[in-house]
């Protein structure tokens, strides 16, 4: 056998020509897929002279995606074993797992998942090899004649939708055969690959749930059954993930929203449109009030704009060209009709606003602007409406109506660098004030295929954002080519108490809108110049940030945000009057304090206060009353006795003022 020379993980090797990566990496069980000349490939791929091969570990992002996608294959194979007449949709990897869409004879139920899991275990134990086979469109259509959805994908191969491209993207059409112990195919699936070398490389998996899903995401298509699953490099990692999910479920803001009486989504109003109850209203107002104070300190000016506007504004801004799908359909007003019902005079179209920027641009444009006024920072708690698909709605973190803490900054090119730098510092410090402390930054740079504006402006703005980001000493992740066409952006990603990442603030430079709105200012030399515009939402939306904080704190808000900061619990009825008076003094001191005057016994009152996650239980019995004192019981169960009333008030006021958690 002749020898070929290849580079493996940076080292030059001479190997027999029939050696494949699976042989080369045979000693390293972590390597489940590889990159050949930079492209992700099966370990069974043939090598050629000069190939550069890199092993990809199962724990890397690519490795995990291949593990999860391969597990999706095994699931599909198992489903067709158990329910022979099930037709296959697609099965891509997703964050932390995978799914596969099926068209089964009968809707799946939870028992089915157990059956499918045990069929999967058998397939995994058999160690079936995934074998790649190149085919032609005609052959594939014949072979997959019984799989109508796959046949449809064959017709759209190439750069199709992101998820469909897992199946058929790329230049060659390929089918993967799962080989049984005797080396013969036992099951096949149309797929681009790559996959694990064999099913025995799936260390740990679990099927999670089923859901209905339209074929290829369109409601015009048939409704399929989706099964979600997860797969991990070890049982320990799977267990840790399942624990995280259980913890996340306990903290789910939708559940806490009901338990703590914060907000609700009445069906009468419609999907994705929340109402805030009094307690949620207090949290929200505390969030807004603090934000308002901080923005005033940073020289923002507060503006207001209406919820609806004539279509022309969103034509000028371009939203109707590129964002119409995300908008509520227009209201047609003042239409006039002929006697026969035909339209005599076309009506005026009004839209609910999905964004505030165009309104702020009109404020900017309402009169001439001088360089002396810049940077001009316009701020609005602006409520916007976006027609999100019902499938993506998620409590108040993804709603259809929400209020952005939206600001637009207009500055000169020279001011941009300084402005971005101070803006990022302001944003991060404010997030820290709300209790988030673990961040990384993501910088989205120009997509060379799709952008407006001058290259030099992009470079300057991107460099300014990069400099501002680097100055923060935080991890900076590059999202190369990920910017919107109108400008580069930094987004702040925050980790919550259980390590989940949330995209929070974005700082977006915009080269387009100042042009479309013909924004100008008169410069020092008297010439008319175009300002740079920066969009920036700090919370994203108040609702979303509310949801994130609810989950971060698991509903146990720090006192400054807590709807009720202190609850009075008398040891017995006889101390109600005394404690009622203490509570009154607390309220006078600006503390949100209440007396539990219900008929419940003390222990029940304590439990209720714990359920409501109230930071301070203020308890009074005989000794407290005699001494003119109270006792504190904290959320962690600790108790402090005999605190003089004035000290008790001072302690609560201090943590509220300092916004510390207790
Ligand atoms: Zn596949
Ligand atoms: Zn904007």
Image (cartoon, rainbow, N blue to C red):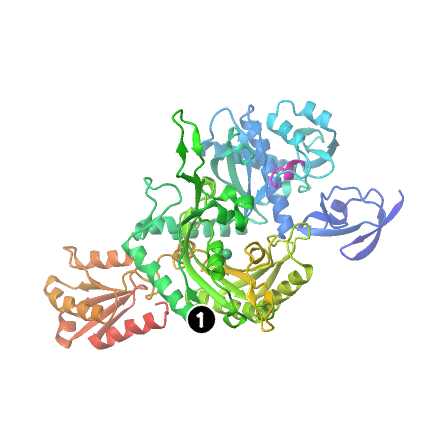
Work out whether 433 lies above or below 359: below
Hey, which quadrant is residue 285 in on the image? bottom left
Q: Residues within 10 Å of mark 1 (few under 14, many from 20)?
A: few
Q: Is residue 94 left or right of residue 247?
A: right
Nearer to the camera, 238 or 40: 40
Tell me: residue 563, above or below residue 307: below
Whole-percent x, y for residue 222 in the image: 52, 28
404 left or right of 423 in image: left
Res. 28 visible in picture: no
Q: Which of 123 and 328 is in front in this view?
A: 328
Relative to 242, does residue 557 appear above or below in the rendering? below
- The residue sitting at 41% across, 69% down in the picture is 296
Residue under the image location 37 percent in, 46 percent down: 273
Give the residue at mark 1: 299
- Residue 77 lies, in percent from the top left, at 59, 32
Q: Residue at x 64, y 36 (%)?
A: 167
Image spot of residue 644 (x, y percent): 20, 77
Along the line of sight, the residue nearer the viewer: 252 or 283: 283
Please give the range of residues in magenta: 162-168
Does the magenta segment cover residue 211?
A: no
User: 410 left or right of 458?
Assistant: left
* Total numbered badges shown on the rendered structure: 1
Pick out the residue farthest to the right.
2
Q: Can residue 22 be seen in this view?
A: yes
Q: Where is residue 481 in the image (x, y as percent from the top left)?
A: 65, 54
Q: Which element type, helix, strand or loop, lies under badge 1?
A: loop
Instruction: Indicate the quadrant containing the C terminus: top left, top right, bottom left or bottom right.
Output: bottom left
Quadrant position of ligand 1: top right
Q: Residue at 50% x, 70% y: name it.
A: 373
């Amino acid at each position: 056998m002749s020898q070929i020379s290849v580079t493996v993980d940076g080292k030059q090797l001479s190997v027999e020509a029939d050696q494949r990566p699976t042989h080369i990496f045979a000693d390293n069980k972590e390597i489940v897929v590889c990159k050949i000349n930079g492209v992700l490939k099966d370990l069974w791929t043939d090598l050629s002279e000069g190939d550069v091969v890199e092993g990809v570990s199962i724990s890397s992002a690519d490795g995990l995606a291949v593990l999860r996608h391969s597990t999706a294959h095994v699931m599909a194979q198992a489903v067709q074993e158990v329910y022979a007449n099930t037709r296959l949709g697609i099965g891509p990897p997703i964050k932390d797992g995978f799914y596969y869409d099926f068209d089964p004879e009968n809707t799946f139920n939870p028992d089915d998942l157990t059956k499918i899991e045990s069929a999967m275990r058998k397939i995994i134990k058999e160690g079936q090899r995934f074998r790649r086979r190149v085919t032609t469109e005609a052959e594939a259509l014949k072979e997959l004649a019984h799989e109508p959805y796959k046949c449809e994908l064959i017709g759209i191969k190439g750069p199709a939708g992101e998820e469909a491209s897992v199946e058929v993207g790329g230049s060659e059409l390929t089918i993967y055969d799962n080989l049984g112990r005797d080396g013969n195919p036992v099951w096949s699936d149309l797929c681009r690959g790559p996959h694990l070398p064999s099913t025995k490389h799936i260390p740990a998996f679990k099927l999670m749930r089923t859901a209905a899903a339209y074929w290829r995401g369109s409601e015009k298509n048939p409704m399929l059954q989706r099964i979600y699953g997860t797969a991990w490099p070890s049982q320990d990692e799977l267990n840790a993930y399942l624990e995280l999910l259980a913890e996340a479920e306990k903290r789910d803001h939708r559940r806490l929203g009901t338990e703590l009486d914060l907000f609700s989504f009445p069906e009468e109003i419609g999907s994705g449109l929340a109402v805030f109850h009094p307690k949620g209203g207090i949290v929200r107002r505390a969030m807004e009030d603090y934000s308002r104070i901080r923005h005033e300190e940073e020289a923002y000016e507060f503006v207001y704009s209406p919820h609806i506007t004539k279509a022309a504004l969103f034509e000028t801004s371009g939203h109707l060209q590129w964002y119409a799908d995300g908008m509520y359909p227009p209201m047609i007003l003042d239409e006039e009709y002929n006697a026969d019902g035909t339209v005599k005079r076309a009506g005026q179209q009004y839209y609910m606003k999905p964004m505030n920027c165009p309104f702020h641009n009109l404020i900017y444009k309402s009169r001439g602007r001088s360089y002396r006024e810049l940077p001009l920072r316009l701020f609005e708690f602006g409520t916007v409406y976006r027609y999100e698909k019902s499938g993506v709605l998620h409590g108040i973190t993804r709603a259809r109506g929400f209020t952005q803490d939206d600001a637009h900054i207009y500055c000169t090119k020279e001011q941009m660098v300084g402005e971005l730098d101070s803006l990022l510092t302001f944003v991060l410090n404010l997030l820290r004030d709300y209790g988030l402390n673990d961040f990384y930054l993501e910088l989205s740079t120009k997509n060379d295929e799709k952008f407006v504006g001058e290259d030099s402006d992009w470079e300057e703005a991107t460099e300014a954002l990069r400099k501002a980001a680097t100055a923060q000493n935080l991890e900076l992740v590059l999202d190369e080519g990920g910017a919107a066409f109108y400008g580069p952006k930094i987004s702040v990603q925050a980790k919550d108490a259980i390590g989940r990442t949330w995209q929070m603030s974005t700082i977006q430079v915009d080269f387009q809108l100042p042009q479309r709105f013909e924004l100008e200012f008169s410069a020092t030399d008297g010439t008319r110049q175009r300002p740079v515009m920066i969009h920036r939402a700090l919370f994203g939306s108040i609702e979303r940030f509310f949801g994130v904080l609810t989950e971060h704190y698991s509903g146990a808000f720090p006192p400054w945000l807590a709807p009720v900061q202190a609850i009075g619990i008398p040891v017995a009825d006889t101390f109600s009057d005394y404690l009622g008076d203490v509570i009154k003094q607390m309220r006078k001191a600006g503390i949100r304090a209440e007396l539990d005057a219900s008929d419940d016994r003390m222990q029940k009152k304590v439990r209720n206060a714990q359920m409501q996650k109230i930071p301070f239980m203020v308890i009074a019995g005989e000794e407290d009353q005699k001494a003119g004192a109270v006792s504190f019981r904290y959320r962690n169960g600790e108790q402090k006795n005999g605190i003089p009333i004035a000290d008790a008030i001072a302690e609560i006021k201090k943590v509220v003022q300092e916004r510390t958690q207790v």
